[in-house]
Image: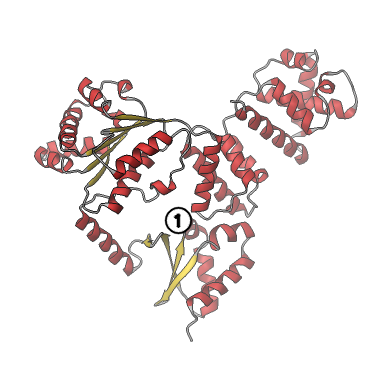
Amino acid sequence: MEIPIKTLWIQVLERLQLELSRPTFETWIKTASAERLENNCLVILTPNPFARNWLQKYYINTIARVVQDIVGHPVQIYLTVIQGDEVYFLNEGELSQTVSIQNHILENASKSRIITSELNYKYVFSRFVVGANNRMAHAAALAVAESPGREFNPLFLCGGVGLGKTHLMQAIGHYRRKNYSDSKIFYVSTEQFTNDLITAIRNDNIQGFREHYRAANVLLVDDIQFIGGKESTQEEFFHTFNTLYEAGKQVIIASDRPPKQISRLQERLCSRFSMGLLADIQAPDLETRMAILQNKAEYENIILPPDVIEYIALNYTSNIRELEGALTRSVAYISIWGLAMTVENIISFLEPKIEKLPATPEAILSVVADALNISIEDLKSNSRRREISWARQIGMYLMRQHTNLSLPRIGEVFGGKDHTTVIYSCDKIAKLLENDRTIVQTLRQLSDRINMTSRSQK
């Protein structure tokens, strides 16, 4: 008798929960679900492509073995990704349904006359975290999505690497695709635009190239800074821009610098890029970075403690890609080793990748005094009490690691000690670190607090 799919999956979960570590089970297995069992093929839904790939790489054989034990015969496992109401089959060529689903998508795309192959499904407005750094850009992008070709044309999104320009740009495309199925949405990188032009010249089909791009209702062009110095590309883009603008069509451009700072950009293009709205995106503040991590964790069904969110947000400040990358690496590391998701467990893994900011001597003295329960005056004193001498030696070692102060200057900070005392203290702690795990952990925790203090004062 065939086992109902829900009953089968409950039994699979019960078995896997006993075999796998709790963090692994909670992160990767519990978030998946069985959809159907047909022709000895079990289709399992996963919450995102990352989870699907991870299960495929590390746990698919374990799942297959457990399912076989329960049903009594070999079963093939097919992993899919579910987003909203749509299921994306990623095992190309393995499942017959894949072909029909892909054909269905292509058929719909053809009917709506929208080019969507370049749009990332994750880059939608609902997944964009709004903060003080990007509020104006988000509002402008939403306004353009709702009423293209009216107020902000062109919309020029400007900001450093990994700050969300591409996300906002593609969110506009997704919005138009979902709500206005008769729109033609073209998303293209400047490199692709140039390559298409080169191909058109080679094939003597410039007219076809022009008709293609000038048929767009919304044209989204990423990394426009790379157009500098490419005279033929600038010429064609200038006329494409003019045609679309005069027809009331929307142009959205993204760049890592303002138009006037793009080298070897024709003046007429610079003028047109500047005639609409220039929306600048800055690096996110701490609260926004924490919100971004929380958003990503919730979307990917990852249980993330608040102190872990704060730790990653404090240490990765330059851009969102690095921030989310740190989270992805942390989840992978924790899962591989079967550890709990705690700050202590990810510090050693992330620490080499964290840019350490110079710390002030005062901050180090404060952290050491507070952690070891003595006063700053004691650290600077000549007392030889064991606990004070020990704290002083740790403080000197940390100051050597976290500042660029010379040995005599460190001695001065600690109440005028001789530089030979500093050398002795640093050598002593360094030698203890080779064999004493307790000291290693203590110094990691102190270093972490110093880094957090430095970043909060940045």
Helix, strand or loop at mark 1: loop
- Image label count: 1
- Quarter of the image where one finds residue 428: top right
Residue 122 position in % (x across, y down): 40, 49
- Quarter of the image where one finds residue 225: top left
Residue 190 position in % (x across, y down): 27, 35
Tell whether 130 sits left or right of 29: left
Residue appearing at x 67%, y 16% in the figure: 405
Q: Is residue 142 above or below residue 223?
A: below
Within-10-Å neighbours for mark 1: few <14, some 14–19, many 20+: some
Residue appearing at x 50%, y 32% in the figure: 318
Q: Quadrant of the C terminus?
A: top right
Residue 352 position in % (x across, y down): 59, 35
Residue 142 position in % (x across, y down): 35, 42
Residue type, mark 1 in image:
Asn
Q: Is residue 156 above or below residue 82?
A: above
Tell whether 357 sits left or right of 85: right
Q: Is residue 126 visible?
A: yes
Q: Is residue 284 above or below residue 42?
A: above
Residue appearing at x 77%, y 15% in the figure: 411
Residue appearing at x 61%, y 36% in the figure: 351
Q: Nearer the viewer, residue 125 or 383?
A: 125
Q: Nearer the viewer, residue 227 or 427?
A: 227
Task: Find the residue positioned furthest to the bottom.
Answer: 1
Q: Is residue 229 visible?
A: no
**Circle 1 sits on which residue?**
48
